[in-house]
Image (spheres, helix red, strand yellow):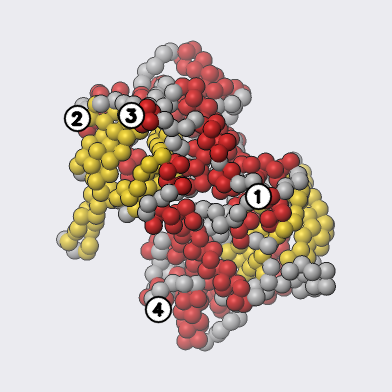
Amino acid sequence: MSDATMTPLLSVRDLKVAFEGEGGTREVLHGVSLDVYPGQTVAIVGESGSGKSTTASAVIGLLPGTGHVTAGSITLDGRELTDLSQTQFESVRGRDIGYVPQDPMSNLNPVWSIGFQVKEAIRANGIATGRKEVEQRAIEVLKQAGLADAERRLHQYPHQFSGGMRQRALIGIGLAADPKLLIADEPTSALDVTVQRVILDHMASLTRERGTSVLLITHDLGLAAERADTIVVMNQGEIVESGPSREILENPQHPYTQRLVAAAPSIASQRIQAKVEDRGILRESDIDAPATVKVTDLVKEYKIRQGGFRSEQFRAVDGVSFEIPRGKTLALVGESGSGKSTIAKMVLKLEEPTSGSIEVDGVNTGKLNAKDTFNLRRRMQPVFQDPYGSLDPLRSIGNLIAEPLNIHKVGDGASRRARVEELLEQVALPQELASRYPNELSGGQRQRVAIARALALKPDILVLDEAVSALDVLVQAQILQLLAELQSELGLTYLFITHDLAVVRVAADLVCVMERGKLVEQGTVDEIFAQPSQEYTQRLLDAIPGASLSLGGA
């Protein structure tokens, strides 16, 4: 693919990018060089802040704010892009370089129909001009993107599409003008693994048919290795290593790449035996031990309005039963809409079951009065997915961690401050962070604060709802390690909600697989991964990025 006789379609040489700010000029890319050949897929990997998306934005001429190229060259098919005016770039963007952004909800205008937005892209790229011609091309674009009943879909709005459908629409827009190069910036990071696989397969087939080159931006090394010919590893604005995907995966040379490979759950799950031994094999005596949490025949129904005065019952959770032994981790896994988070809310008593029971240490929580429920919350605390949304941006870190102590009237001001310091130390954060605010912290630090707050009342049960899914693999690995250490040290019991089976493989003892509200399979981690009895479970396992790779030493 990158034969010396071939000319690169995209060539980036010694690229430097800087941003202007109050403190002066800050350089964020320090001499980046890479090539993408015709028909080739190149993946840029690295954690947040490594320069991946900045490199992509420079290539497509969409650097945010005060960002600008200060040195270097970007050529596409022999044409220099760095000296193009914005007007000139408009003829390149869309026609020669397509773009698929990360978050379909923030990149599709909620007040415009899908059809209007597809047509706008078609007109802007000069693909068609007449009203009927544009309409026909828009239908064709959505059909090519894999959306059934495209004529009707044109008139729908983003909120009426699932996450996978919205991403398909964006891929359709990105490929509408048959560009030579498609930049896909974390195109599936917000999607379930099964939907992710379908979307990536479809994108690969479309680009292969058209001979389109792809520059894939991702923090998921397993996904990069599975989907790309070449991997480029970035760290702090520099390329630290690049080469064929398998070579990077099996024999990483740079310490940073080695850390990325070691931290990637989808790859670590292939080399899991040591992890299992570290975690401790789940013995028969553990399973037979009294359950800390026992869920029996749990049902949750919602009334769904059908128009007028008509409504029907929707069963979100349908007869689910499981037990969590004390000091162990049970993972609830499944796609979006499978009922996982609804169960978490009922366990936390944020929602009441329609029927069935939840017991904590033999006590039926459905029969508790308000005072007893308040006391139960001291023993059972949540950690949510989004550390950006779950921490009040107007309160200091110290106040946020102390909040449960204040609500439950535990101790006085001095003892609470001491407890905050103790908790910060427990989650490996410096004590000086107590006076700072959430926007001053990284995503990983914020999630550590959320865990510290959850531990403030010394609970023995944590409900972790997608608690690591929004984090980069290195930060994710740190948080998972922290949770394992806290569980070992404090004897905590975890209900771990996730759609990522790769994470489950390294973090859980027991697994319950959910599909459309029903529990379709449960067992130990080793049983589920080695011998899944359900086709649905096998599909989830097959969809783990990098699962199809057979790595040396696995």
In contact (CB < 8 Å): disc 2 and disc 4: no
Give the Cα separation between the discs numbered 1 and 2: 54 Å
Q: Amino acid at mark 4?
A: Glu
**269 vs 32, nearest the viewer:** 269
Decide: is 117 above or below 359: below
**Location of residue 24 in the rendering, given as x and y in whole percent from the top left corner:** 77, 44
Decide: is 267 above or below 61: above
Earlier residue among tags 1 and 4: 4
In contact (CB < 8 Å): disc 1 and disc 2: no
Give the Cα separation between the discs numbered 1 and 4: 48 Å
Decide: is 494 above or below 89: above
Q: From the image, tell me which residue sits under label 2.
A: 367
Give the Cα separation between the discs numbered 3 and 2: 26 Å
Question: Could you say whether the residue bearing mark 1 is in a helix, strand or loop?
Answer: loop
> What residue is drawn where x is 40% and y is 74%?
148
Q: Amino acid at mark 1?
A: Gly
Q: From the image, tell me which residue sits under label 3.
A: 288
**Location of residue 79 in the rendering, given as x and y in whole percent from the top left corner:** 79, 73
> What residue is drawn where x is 30% and y is 51%?
517
> What residue is drawn where x is 36% and y is 44%?
522
Q: Dot 3 surroundings within 10 Å: few (below 14), some, or many (20 or more)?
A: few
Please indicate whether residue 319 sits to the left or right of residue 381 in the image: left
Q: Dot 1 surroundings within 10 Å: few (below 14), some, or many (20 or more)?
A: few
Earlier residue among tags 3 and 1: 3
**371 vs 540, nearest the viewer:** 540
Earlier residue among tags 2 and 4: 4
Q: Amino acid at mark 3?
A: Asp
Question: Could you say whether the residue bearing mark 4 is in a helix, strand or loop?
Answer: helix
Whether residue 406 is visible here, answered yes or no, is yes
Q: From the image, tell me which residue sits under label 4.
A: 151
Earlier residue among tags 1 and 2: 2
Q: From the image, tell me which residue sits under label 1.
A: 552
